């Protein structure tokens, strides 16, 4: 076998930054680079509020710059890094600075629309951006991808479904592609009626059957809004119209997604449900790297099953398709309303099935407007949050079983 020709841009030490290093995707990324320290040098780490973990990560990987969004966490971060020589700062501007610092590869894994501005800083710098923060694309899709083209930035999808498609998508011969099929586990409430879902608690909503993830995406998986966000993300990443993106419920999460070709061939990527596989694929791209991920044992699994999604019981999926078809700021408003509704569910202010109702009512109250620039994206995000807040207030007085429950 012939060794691939060494390419210094690919095979040299990769300078990497992780935006959202203290989260679920961020800690998996740290885990992988810590296993191959000779291949990576950490430029910057950024997090939201967990100063203690951020400082421990910075020390462990020898980061050069560390940023924390929450200014009240600054004293803890500063004291924890005393004497290390690691540069640190706090506040939103510091997180933007982390995105701007010179790096070859950046992980965008801040949760929610808060990730948009810092991830865009990394995109504008060029190089590779591994994108986990799907909300960036949902809010600013076309503007985001145009910035990437302008800056010669390669976006690599981290989401397991989009990473799977990326691995089997023949981009050079797009005319042969018929459609893409996003698989969905169906979440913890896959078989429940709406009435049964309405009584579910926060702890039950975040207990995903296959994946270990952050709180927000776990709740999005339970409502299936996560698949709706992924549908919009796929539309922007692979430049396919909404009607050529199918969703298929596959409870075992073994097939991570598929591409269907005009000759009837269907190509899929399979693996154990562990985010370290798609993250490693992005970290080493275009090469591969070892991971400690459990190997797939199909004989032990025995059977794989598939179902059509039920948009009556999971209306979030229908709402996302409608928002994508509506164009303009609809997807951004939908995302903002969903973030506000998920936060209200976490705080015990609304019930589980109210999440999709809040999103639907917010979309009905917000006529779709054009999005011409990033200012319009931030305005649409603000509008969605404000209207969703009014809708949520209208749900006040509903008895919520899980009010105040800790995760
Ligand atoms: N988890 C998964 O398996 C998975 C899979 C596919 C895609 N994704 C996507 O990846 C993103 C992250 O998901 P996750 O599950 O890793 O979330 P998570 O565990 O909740 O972590 C979120 C990260 O964002 C940071 N953060 C929050 N607000 C911030 C702000 N204003 N400025 C800077 N950092 C901020 C958090 O910092 P602190 O914790 O320090 O506050 C944390 O590091 C989401 O968009 C999600 O949809 C996740």
Image (cartoon, rainbow, N blue to C red):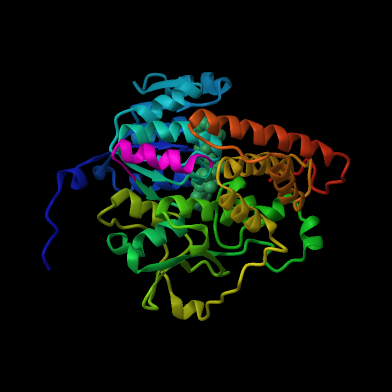
Q: Is residue 356 above or below residue 71?
A: below
Where is the N terminus found, in terms of image quarters? bottom left
Q: Which residues are magenta?
A: 139-154
Q: Nearer the viewer, residue 389 or 176?
A: 176
Q: Residue at x 58, y 54 (%)?
A: 228
- Residue positioned 44% across, 20% down in the render: 89
Closer-to-camera residue (210/282): 282
Side of 332 where 26 appears, left or right? left
Q: Position of residue 38 (x, y in %)?
A: 24, 43
The answer to whether residue 48 shows anywhere in this view is: no
Closer to the camera in the image, 332 or 59:
332
Q: Residue at x 61, y 62 (%)?
A: 209
Q: Quadrant of residue 2?
A: bottom left
**Would you place residue 355 above or below residue 121 in this image?**
below
Give the image quarter of residue 334.
Answer: top right
* Residue 225 located left or right of residue 100: right
Where residue 190 sits: x, y (%)?
A: 67, 66
The correct choice, above or below, for 334 with respect to 377 in the image is below
Residue 114 visible in rendering: yes
Residue 286 locus on image (x, y percent):
26, 54
Count of all numbered marks drawn on residues in the image: 0
- Residue 107 among those drawn in magenta: no
Q: Nearer the viewer, residue 48 or 30?
A: 48
- The x, y position of residue 141, in whole percent, is 47, 43
The chief SS type of the magenta part is: helix
Which residue corresponds to the image point at 33% horizontal and 62% vertical from the top-left?
174
């Amino acid at each position: 076998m012939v060794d691939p020709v060494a390419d210094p841009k690919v095979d040299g030490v990769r300078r990497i930054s992780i935006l959202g290093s203290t989260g679920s995707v961020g800690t998996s990324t740290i885990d992988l680079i810590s296993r191959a320290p000779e291949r990576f040098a950490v430029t910057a780490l950024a997090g939201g509020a967990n100063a203690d973990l951020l400082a421990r990560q910075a020390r462990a990987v020898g980061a050069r710059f560390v940023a924390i969004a929450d200014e009240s966490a600054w004293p803890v971060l500063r004291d924890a890094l005393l004497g290390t020589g690691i540069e640190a700062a706090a506040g939103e501007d510091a997180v933007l600075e982390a995105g701007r610092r010179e790096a070859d590869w950046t992980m965008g894994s801040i949760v929610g629309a808060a990730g948009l501005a810092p991830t865009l800083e990394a995109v504008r710098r060029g190089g590779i951006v591994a994108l986990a923060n799907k909300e960036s694309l949902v809010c600013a899709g076309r503007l985001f991808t145009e910035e990437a083209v302008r800056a010669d930035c390669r976006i690599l999808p981290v989401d397991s479904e989009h990473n799977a498609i990326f691995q089997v998508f023949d981009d050079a011969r797009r005319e042969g592609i018929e459609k893409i099929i996003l698989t969905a586990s169906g979440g913890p409430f896959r078989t429940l009626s709406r009435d049964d879902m309405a009584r579910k608690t926060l702890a039950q909503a975040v207990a995903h059957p296959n994946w270990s993830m952050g709180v927000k995406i776990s709740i999005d998986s339970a409502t299936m809004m996560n698949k709706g966000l992924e549908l919009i993300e796929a539309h922007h990443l692979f430049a396919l119209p909404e009607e050529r993106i199918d969703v298929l419920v596959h409870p075992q999460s073994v097939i991570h997604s598929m591409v269907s070709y005009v000759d009837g061939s269907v190509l899929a990527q399979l693996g154990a449900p562990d985010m370290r596989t798609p993250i490693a694929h992005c970290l080493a791209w275009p090469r591969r790297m070892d991971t400690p991920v459990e190997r797939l044992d199909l004989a032990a699994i025995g059977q794989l099953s598939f179902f059509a999604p039920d948009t009556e019981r999971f209306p979030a999926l229908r709402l996302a398709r409608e928002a994508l078809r509506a164009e303009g700021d609809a997807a951004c408003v939908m995302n903002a309303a969903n973030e506000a509704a998920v936060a209200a569910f976490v705080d015990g202010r609304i019930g589980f099935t109210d999440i999709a109702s809040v999103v639907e009512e917010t979309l009905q109250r917000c006529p779709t407007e054009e999005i011409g620039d990033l200012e319009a994206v931030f305005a649409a995000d603000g509008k969605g949050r404000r209207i969703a807040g009014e809708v949520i207030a209208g749900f006040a007085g509903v008895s919520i079983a899980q009010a105040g429950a800790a995760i």
